[in-house]
Amino acid sequence: MSTKKDPFILALPKGRVFKDFLPKLENTPFALKDNFENSRKMLLDTRHPDLKVLIIRGWDVPAYITSGAAHLGVVGKDILIEKEDEEFVELLDLEIGKCRLSLAGKSNLNSTSSRLRVATKYPKSAISYMNSIGIQAEIIYLHGSQEIAPVLGLADVIIDLVDTGNTLKENGMKELDKISDISTRLIVNKASLKTRSRLIAEITDALK
Ligand code: PRP
C-alpha cells in the first residue's frame, strides 16, 4: 500500500502579491523549486514533497479554497470582503499588500447628491459604504482602471484600492474618504484544518 499523500496545494495570486509573498517562502522548507520565471505552468513543485503551489487570479482563490481544490490560499482582504459568502477560514494577516479601499472623485461630493454612479470592482463594499453615508449607489461594475471612469463621464465617483495615490493623481482624481485598511491574508479550507492540520501549522509558522 502506498503511503504517498495527495498533494497539499497553496494557491497564490498572480501579480504584485505574488512578488511580495515569494520572499516569505524563500528560506523555508516550502520554497519554490521550479524555475517559474517566464513559465506558463500553473502548478509548481516546492522543496517540500507534499506541497505544490498553484498560481491563479486573486479573485479565484476563495473558490479554490471553499471547494477544497486547494487547501491554503493567499488573497487580499478587498477580495475576501466581496466573497464573504464562500466558506473559508482566515488564518493570518501576512502584513503584505498593504493599501486602503477608498472613495475617490474629481472633486468633493456635492452635499445635495442623493444618488451617485459608482465605478468599482467591489460592489458589496461600495453599496455598504454608500448606504452608510446616506447616498444611493448605482454600481458601474468595471474590471480595473476605474480611475478614468469619472474623468470620461462614465461614473461620478470610484471605490478602489489606493496605495501611493499616483494613479488617482495622474488621472486628475483625489481621494475623498478611506473606507478600510486592506492587507493580504492567508485563508484555509475548513475541512483541511482537521485533515491536514500538521502541514498547515508548519506552513503558517514559517510565514509568521
Ligand atoms: C491597483 C488599484 C489602483 C492602483 C493604486 O491597480 O486598482 O488602480 O493599483 O495604486 P497607487 O495608489 O499606488 O497608484 P492595479 O495596478 O492592481 O491594476 P487594476 O487597475 O487592474 O486593478
Image: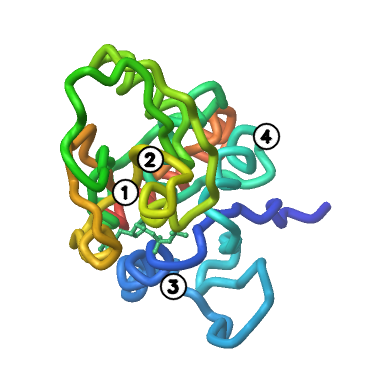
Q: Residue furthest right?
A: 1
Q: Which residue is mark 1?
A: 161
Q: Earlier in the sequence, mark 4 or mark 1?
A: 4
Q: Earlier in the sequence, mark 1 or mark 2?
A: 2
**Cα distance between the residues tagged 3 and 4:** 25 Å
**Cα distance between the residues tagged 1 and 2:** 8 Å
Q: Which mark is residue 67?
A: 4
For mark 3, does the 10 Å Cα neighbourhood hold few (<14), some (14 to 19), or many (20 or more) residues?
some
Contact between labelled residues 2 and 1, with CB atoms less than 8 Å apart: yes
Q: Amino acid at mark 1?
A: Leu
Q: Which residue is mark 3?
A: 31
Q: Residue at x 37, y 19 (%)?
A: 115
Asked if the residue at label 1 sits under 8 Å from ligand 1, the reply is yes
Q: Residue at x 54, y 71 (%)?
A: 46
Helix, strand or loop at mark 2: helix
Q: Earlier in the sequence, mark 3 or mark 1?
A: 3
Q: Earlier in the sequence, mark 3 or mark 4?
A: 3
Q: Amino acid at mark 3?
A: Ala
Quadrant position of ligand 1: bottom left
Among the 4 quarters of the image, the one containing residue 31: bottom left
For mark 4, does the 10 Å Cα neighbourhood hold few (<14), some (14 to 19), or many (20 or more) residues?
some
Q: Which residue is mark 2?
A: 78
